[in-house]
Amino acid sequence: MKMLFSTSILSMIGLTLTGTASSYELSSDNTPQHDPDQCTAILVTAGAAKDGVGSMTTHTNDCLDCDFRLVKVPAADHAPGSMRPIIGGRAQYPRYVGDDRGEPYSKEALAKGLYDWKETVAVGHIPEVPHTYAYLDGDYGIQNEFQLSMGESTCGALLHSRPTFDGGRALLEMSELSRIAMERCKTSRCAVQLMGDLAVEYGFYGAVWEGDMMTVLGEAGEAMTVTDKEESWMFHVLSDDTGASAVWVAQRVPEGHVTAVANGFVIKEVDLSDADNFLGSDNLYSVASRAGLWTEGEHFSFAEVYGLARGHLSTYVNRRVWRVLSLAAPSLNLPAETDMWARDYPFSVPVDDGLAVADVAAMQRDYYEGTPYDTSANPAGGPYGNPARYDQSPVDGMTKEDLVAGRFERTISLFRTSYSFVTQSRASLPDVVGGLTWFGQFTPHATVYVPVYASVLETPESLSVGSLHRLDRRSCWWAFSAVGNYAAQWFSFTIGEIRAMQGKLEEGWFQGQEEVEALALTIQGYGGDVAARGYLTEWSAAQAEMVRAEWWEFLDYMMGKYRDGMKMADVKVDMIKPTKLFYPRWWLEMTGFWGAPGATASEAKKNNEGEFEYDVEWDKKPKHKKSAASFNSDEVSVHSGSTFDGPTPKVDAGEDDVAGASSAAVAKAASDVMGATTTATSPVLGAGEQGPRGGGGTGPSPSPSWRPWGRPWGSEG
């Protein structure tokens, strides 16, 4: 039954509905407005990490129009009978406006002179608890004061619903569910159970609920990677078939293993009787049966029963999962090509060697380097290997059907990432220093992961200000964006410079991490948690500010070194000598530099044999190959009305004197090149006629195919 249902869904994708896709993004008047984000999340158990690193999770928030700020939501006490407001979810700036979730969210802190944003209005309420925990917040909850950490990835699903504020029956979506879990849970097991139970009770809706069916179903489900100091869980959720509840499942990641999710469910076989390793809703099977997705007695794979069949577009999902698993466990030799459901890939893999934060950050910065799918090593990246593949849009007469028929490789590091991070949760350390988020704004391969402790009193200003509305030099995001976009023009030359800067900063933090944390614990011993948190707040702020300042200076450096197709290798010299970057051979062949597209230099030289009578040396004056007397009218015939089809002969004439050359000078130049005295068949300007650069003449105009005033090859200007 599932295969038949999937076929009908794919046909729906081909019959796109009219209208603009709506999402969990709300404007001040509750109008949905948002461009869907599709993210990658990696989960590393403590046993898969190097000693002392602890468990890690990641999230690349791949959203082209999202609020990129990092905000600290404070802990709070609540009166008995209080109700927690539920917001509809807003990813664009400002994602929230109010005084109860941290100072950067206050109306007073918003950018001035742009728009008069109103305070966020709740779309519903649920009972509040007496005390809520503090946490780092982005578009989803990131890490709380007890080291509970989460990453997120939207997933394709076959059931979807509408929110209560738009005519539906579902109250909760993933960003609010993650925040409620951050506020109320200390462990990952608590978090997945709470998020699942609330979704079942109040109803769950995905990031998009109307419009283009491909987008609706592609964003209908959610996955969260959830970890604490002891356990790590993968969580999946989607609406049920009534639109008023939800279906969910969670699987524990075995110690020593790594898993990843990239817009497609990865939990397959489920055993709810094994409570140590599986949790899920009671309706897991009944909804599948009732909705016609599964028949009792058939094999049950959560991913295949509830997940969206993407056909030839499945590499958008599966390739990223393959890349993470293969980097973590290369000895397994997992195949890069698999079926639509990635049946060749296990849920998780044991690592070959323990992973450090730098290893996981490198996974997030990956664009398949060194593989057949390397986006920096094929023609779509241009002559300088830009790995970005920009989002599809129906331009130039293309339809959505045209676009769906094709695909680019979808990399982990993406040009439209608003932020990404790697968290650490360490049982070996007190919570005040154990929870740490390495936070980077903009594209992962062009950002720096700045250490921000979960216990800070407030987040660094340079990470908590700014918007996409206008450039803000106080913001790290804008510094990274400026360098990244500028450097992308000559990516193969500039990426090494960026990596060197990243390594210098991040490696310094890795080396000094123990010392910083030891000092924080010493301060805690004298002044308590508040004193330690104050120190870590100031330290994290100083690191972020250093990065912001250095990265703007880095932009100046890059603009001075790379420009106009040239590289300034050394500027501390008497006279600079720029290096011309030019283009790689394969690109010149592809674009027809040597003739028709695909022609090679060898072919062009053979075709042109006998035409060039010079030994050409770049940046030097051409040398005659034959004596002047050897040129004759059989080789070069130029006269009034004639056409010379060969290459343009070059003359070592000065720039200024040629511009105002007299007819005699022009004739003399022609004579020098031709090796003969100007005759009736020679190119001489007629009396009173204007030369091409202003000179007069005494004869007929020369053919435009031959210009003796041309400058020597390799001359500047």
Image: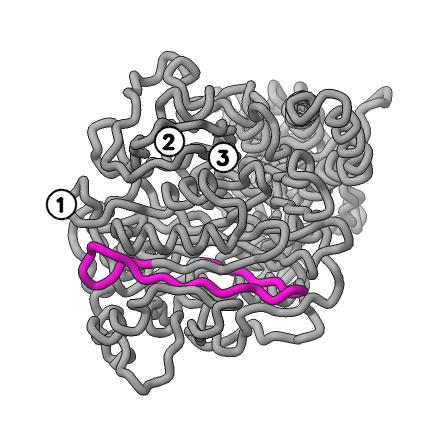
Secondary structure under tag 3 reads: loop
Residue located farthest toward the left when viewing the structure as drawn: 167
Secondary structure under tag 2 reads: loop
| Residue 610 locus on image (x, y percent) | 69, 59
Q: How many marks?
A: 3
- Residue positioned 44% across, 48% down in the render: 390
In depth, the one of 11 and 84 nearer the eye is: 84
| Residue 36 locus on image (x, y percent) | 35, 46
- Residue behind mark 1: 167
- Residue behind mark 2: 95
In depth, the one of 416 and 55 nearer the eye is: 55
Mark 1 or mark 3, which has the lower sequence index? 3
- Residue positioned 24% across, 58% down in the render: 160
Quadrant of the rendering where the C terminus is positioned = top right
466 w.r.t. 195: above or below: above
On the picture, is 525 further left or further right than 478? right
Secondary structure under tag 1 reads: loop
- Residue positioned 24% across, 79% down in the render: 4
- Residue behind mark 3: 133
Looking at the picture, which amino acid does disc 3 mark? Tyr
Q: Which region is colored magenta?
A: 238-262
Answer whether residue 673 is visible to the viewer in this image. Answer: no
Quadrant of the rendering where the N terminus is positioned = bottom left
Mark 3 or mark 2, which has the lower sequence index? 2
Disc 2 to disc 1, how far (Cα)?
A: 22 Å
On the picture, is 287 further left or further right than 527? left
574 w.r.t. 314: above or below: above
On the picture, is 392 further left or further right than 5? right
- Residue positioned 42% across, 72% down in the render: 272
Q: Residues within 10 Å of mark 2 (few under 14, many from 20)?
A: many
Looking at the picture, which amino acid does disc 1 mark? Gly
Looking at the picture, which amino acid does disc 2 mark? Arg
